[in-house]
């Protein structure tokens, strides 16, 4: 008989099941995705309640089920209530949760992903509204790097030669800036402003808590977001509805 086990996890989304249950998609502390059933979670007097709301971090007791795990205990670690009560923070946090839902895989560990996610949500919860878009971009760039798509910005991503600072082009396929020669036959190349790769590099290197201190101009953040969004959607096979909505409303 399979034994119950404990796990710390971040709730990414929830889906109704039957009359009173929920299926909760979780990112475990080791980076694995877990889908689990919370029986009776939609009842008014459920012992789970807000402990399994999206963006919350909880210590859980899980029992193996036939196809989904069963949540038998849940204790809140971080509620992140402010992310659900403020519209701008909710939109930003939804992009983070949607990305994690798409890239995390059952039984495939990536412990850095959980730390990145919880740190980002912690910062989004207290950040100035004007800094949220830069934080989303920083998260996406760092998250893509953890998936093997670290942008190459110092030299041509194809041949490693120097690029033309007056004619900067970014190859979505190669994952970085490219020289004019390599850009010629690459149908995924998009022109970008010269300061966009600089902004991406700064966001990649910065701690999440220090993103605001970079004081990247709003127009540059918007240009950088557009490129990073295109880069993410080019490489991730699943549609990211939250990212699309964030782009439309931003």
Image: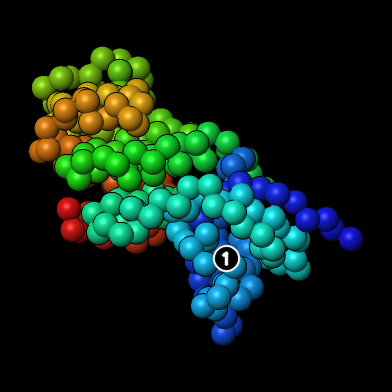
Query: In the rendered image, is residue 226 in sight?
Result: yes
Q: Which residue is mark 1?
A: 48
Q: Which residue sits furthest right?
A: 1
**Residue at image point 38% right, 55% down:** 81
Camera-nearest residue between 112 and 122: 122
Q: What is the quadrant of the N terminus in the image?
A: bottom right
Camera-nearest residue between 32 and 23: 23
The picture places residue 76, in percent across and down from the top left corner, at 54, 52
Q: Which residue sits furthest top?
A: 162
In the image, residue 207 sits, relative to residue 106, either above or below, namely above
**Residue at image point 29% right, 46% down:** 229
The picture places residue 160, in percent across and down from the top left corner, at 35, 17
The picture places residue 173, in percent across and down from the top left corner, at 36, 39
Splitting the image into 4 quarters, where does residue 241 fall? bottom left
Q: Is residue 2 left or right of residue 86?
A: right
Query: In the rendered image, is residue 175 in sight?
Result: no
Q: Report helix, strand or loop for mark 1.
A: loop
**Residue at image point 21% right, 41% down:** 128
- The image shows a total of numbered marks equal to 1
In the image, residue 159 sits, relative to residue 53, either above or below, namely above
């Amino acid at each position: 008989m399979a034994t119950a086990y404990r796990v710390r996890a971040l709730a990414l989304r929830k889906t109704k099941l039957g009359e009173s249950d929920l299926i909760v998609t979780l990112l475990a502390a080791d980076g694995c995705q877990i889908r689990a059933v919370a029986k009776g979670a939609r009842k008014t007097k459920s012992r789970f309640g807000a402990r399994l709301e999206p963006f919350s971090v909880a210590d859980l007791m899980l029992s193996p089920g036939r196809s989904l795990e069963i949540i038998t205990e849940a204790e809140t670690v971080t509620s992140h209530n402010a992310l659900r009560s403020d519209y701008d923070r909710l939109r930003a946090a939804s992009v983070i949760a949607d990305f994690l839902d798409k890239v995390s895989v059952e039984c495939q560990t990536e412990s850095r992903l959980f730390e990145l996610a919880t740190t980002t949500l912690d910062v989004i919860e207290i950040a100035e509204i004007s800094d949220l878009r830069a934080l989303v971009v920083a998260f996406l760039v760092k998250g893509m790097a953890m998936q093997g798509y670290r942008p190459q910005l110092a030299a041509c991503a194809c041949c490693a030669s120097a690029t033309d600072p007056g004619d900067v082009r970014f190859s979505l396929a190669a994952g970085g800036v490219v020289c004019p020669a390599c850009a010629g036959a690459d149908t995924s190349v998009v022109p970008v402003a010269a300061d966009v790769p600089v902004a991406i590099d700064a966001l990649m290197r910065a701690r999440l808590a220090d993103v605001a201190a970079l004081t990247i101009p709003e127009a540059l953040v918007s240009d950088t977001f557009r490129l990073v969004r295109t880069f993410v959607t080019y490489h991730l096979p699943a549609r990211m509805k939250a990212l699309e909505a964030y782009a439309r409303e931003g």
